[in-house]
Image (spheres, grey):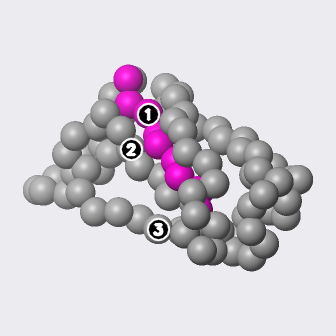
């Protein structure tokens, strides 16, 4: 975490923090949701299997950091999800 007040400071993420995820199709229907544990450096790995009933087209992946206070603002980055039957 980067704090920009005075001198910039980096702080390690709480070891009990998790990343929550929600995948929605292009109509806003929720396809998947869950959480992933963070590694020692705050990284995580997701491998998600889209259901066979997912609508074709674009989808979105929303990530949230759970269990960590003091973070403000959000960042959004979108990339098309893989075709049905493929993993991310």
Image location of residue 2, percent across then percent down: 29, 50
Describe residue 66's horizontal placement relative to residue 8 as left or right: right
The residue pinned by badge 3 equals: 76
Q: Is residue 19 above or below residue 29?
A: above
CA neighbours of label 1 inside 10 A, class few (<14), some (14 to 19), many (20+) = many
Q: Residue furthest right?
A: 85
Which numbered circle lies on residue 65?
2
Please state the extent of the stretch shown in magenta in the rendering.
16-24
Please tell me which residue is depicted at 55% across the width and 69% down the height of the picture: 28
**Mark 3 vs mark 2, CA separation in Å:** 13 Å
Image location of residue 40, percent across then percent down: 49, 26
**Mark 1 vs mark 3, CA separation in Å:** 18 Å
Describe residue 4's horizontal placement relative to residue 13 as left or right: left
58, 14: nearer the viewer: 58
User: Which element is circle 1 on?
Assistant: strand
Image location of residue 18, percent across then percent down: 44, 33
Q: Is residue 53 above or below residue 26?
A: above
2, 61: nearer the viewer: 61
The residue pinned by badge 1 equals: 18
Whether residues under marks 1 and 3 lie with C-beta atoms below 8 angstroms apart, the answer is no
């Amino acid at each position: 975490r980067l704090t920009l007040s005075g001198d910039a400071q980096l702080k390690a993420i709480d070891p009990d923090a998790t990343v929550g995820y929600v995948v929605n199709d292009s109509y806003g229907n929720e396809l998947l949701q869950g959480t992933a544990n963070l590694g020692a450096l705050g990284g995580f790995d997701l491998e998600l299997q889209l259901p066979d009933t997912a609508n074709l087209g674009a989808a979105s992946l929303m990530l949230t950091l759970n269990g960590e206070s003091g973070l403000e603002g959000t960042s959004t980055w979108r990339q098309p999800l893989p075709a049905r039957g493929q993993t991310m």
